[in-house]
Image: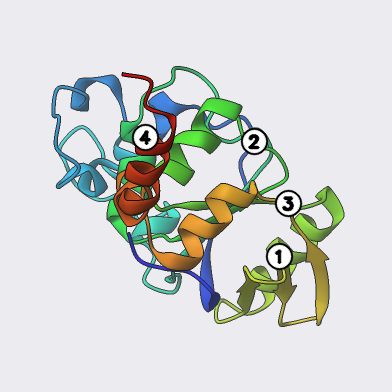
Amino acid sequence: MKAITLLTSTCVPLPLENVDTDQIIPARFLKTTEKAGCGNNLFRDWRYDKNNQPIPDFVLNNPNYKGEILVTGRNFGSGSSREHAAWAIAEYGFRVIVSSFFADIFKNNAMNNGLLPIVVSEPFLSDIFAAIASDNNATLSIDLVNQTIINNASGATETFSINAYKKECFLNGLDDIDYLLARKKEIEQFEKKHNRY
């Protein structure tokens, strides 16, 4: 997992509400047990027509929008609990996703796969969309140490919350297994101390 401490990036706007996991990655692509390739099927039915040709109006097909931050409408990631949805977003190249509300299971899947979900207020989210609409090179800055997000177009700042354990994982580039392995000696010492047999 790649560490995140301070990230400034342009954004890809997806101002749609209630985007569910079947729209993020359709069910027909869930047979794989590998993360590799999932990014190719991110928003597949919105990105490509029935002849597998890119749909020009969809934001991921618009070369004017790029970056490591996906900005989405309220209630993102609802529906089934497929982890492939987080895989697809992260594998496509996004490191942060910003919304005013995430479905709980999606939010946890995202954090477990190195994708940082940031919840902001509705007015702050609207201002981000407005900034991107005015200038597709508008950027956001994420300061994970201080848990702040800055709309660099306006200078507006909000704080966001994150579980302390997950914050440590993101800051150090650790997934759950890496975290445990990094504490192997502490775990072994605890087991010796508390071994009753």
Report the disc number at residue 147.
Answer: 1
Q: Which amino acid does label 1 sit on?
A: Gln
Instruction: Measure the alpha-carbon separation of dots 3 and 2.
Output: 21 Å
Q: Which of 44 and 99 is in front in this view?
A: 99
Of all residues, the one furthest to the front in this rendering is 197
Name the amino acid type tagged 2: Glu
- What's the residue at 20%, 27% (across, down)? 29
Task: Indicate the quadrant where residue 158 lies.
Answer: bottom right
Image marks 2 and 4: residues in contact by CB distance under 8 Å: no
**Camera-side mark, 4 or 1:** 4
Residue placed under numbered mark 4 in the picture: 191
Q: Which residue is at the front of the view, 190 or 72?
A: 190
Q: Which amino acid does label 4 sit on?
A: Glu
Q: Where is residue 45 in the image (x, y as percent from the top left)?
A: 32, 34
User: Disc 1, disc 3: CB below 8 Å?
Assistant: yes
Q: Residues within 10 Å of mark 2 (few under 14, many from 20)?
A: some
Find residue 161 and name its label: 3
Q: How many marks?
A: 4
| Gap between marks 2 and 4 measured at Cα | 48 Å
Image coordinates of residue 178 in percent, x first then y, are 31, 52
Residue under the image location 33 percent in, 56 percent down:
182
2 or 1: tag closer to the N-terminus: 2
Q: Distance between the residues labelled 4 and 1?
A: 35 Å
Disc 3 and disc 4 in contact, CB within 8 angstroms: no
Q: What element carries label 2?
A: loop
> Which residue is disc 2 drawn over?
17
**Label 2 – label 1 distance at C-alpha:** 25 Å
